[in-house]
Amino acid sequence: QKEVEQDPGPLSVPEGAIVSLNCTYSNSAFQYFMWYRQYSRKGPELLMYTYSSGNKEDGRFTAQVDKSSKYISLFIRDSQPSDSATYLCAVNTGANSKLTFGKGITLSVRP
Amino acid sequence: DTGVSQDPRHKITKRGQNVTFRCDPISEHNRLYWYRQTLGQGPEFLTYFQNEAQLEKSRLLSDRFSAERPKGSFSTLEIQRTEQGDSAMYLCASKGTVQEKLFFGSGTQLSVL
């Protein structure tokens, strides 16, 4: 079993839709949870960063962490064509800041 | 632009050749990480430095790979005797002392023919 499992894609939605992206992890030692966005042929860009269970909101993006079920989610409201990218969840224990990534899911938002 | 720069952006080489990539992290960041990403996969950890000290290397990092960060600033990743399986995007990231946030560069895309 991989340490971080991410829902497979690709995912295609119409503009304005609410998008839900999900990951599960297996190691309860993970304490920091991140979502990165990656455009084609670019490096990952940090989108959301959370430490504890609960929700964190930033504009149209909400990150949700449930440490009891080892489940992390990213919600995108009012999705835009510019949100079309690959979304990667990432976790770390905080011991050495080494990130473990999910496989990534490619999102396409249709105009 | 995150402030982490990598050079070159693209590298095409023939099997058996040596290649070297450079990473310049955000200037005040003491930690520097190298990752490798293949198509359809998330980045995989290779190695990391705190200042000039290399603190951890992944099992993915065979003895053909070597990384340095001689003065605790920029870093180089060298691959000797490249193989076709080395074809991937090589990503560099840096981190400051306070928060657990890694900032990535745009990567070096390596193609081994």
Image (tube, helix red, strand yellow):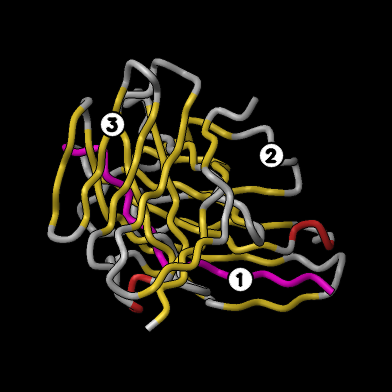
Q: Say few, some or many: other residues with alpha carbon within 10 Å of mark 2 (under 14 / 14 to 19 / 20 or more).
A: few
Which chain is home to disc 2? Answer: B
Which stretch did the figure color magenta?
A: B98-113
Residue B3's quadrant in the figure?
bottom left
Residue corresponding to mark 3: A65
Q: Say few, some or many: other residues with alpha carbon within 10 Å of mark 1 (under 14 / 14 to 19 / 20 or more).
A: many
Residue A21 percent location from the top left of the image? 40, 48
Gap between marks 2 and 1, in whole Å?
Answer: 18 Å
Residue corresponding to mark 2: B60
> Which residue is depicted at the point 75% across and 48% down?
B64
Task: Report if the CB atoms under discs 1 and 3 are less than 8 Å apart.
Answer: no
Under circle 3, the secondary element is strand
Q: Which amino acid, by three-letter code, is at mark 2?
A: Leu
Residue corresponding to mark 1: B109
Q: Say few, some or many: other residues with alpha carbon within 10 Å of mark 3 (under 14 / 14 to 19 / 20 or more).
A: many
| Left or right for B104, reference A41 | left
Residue A94's quadrant in the figure?
top left
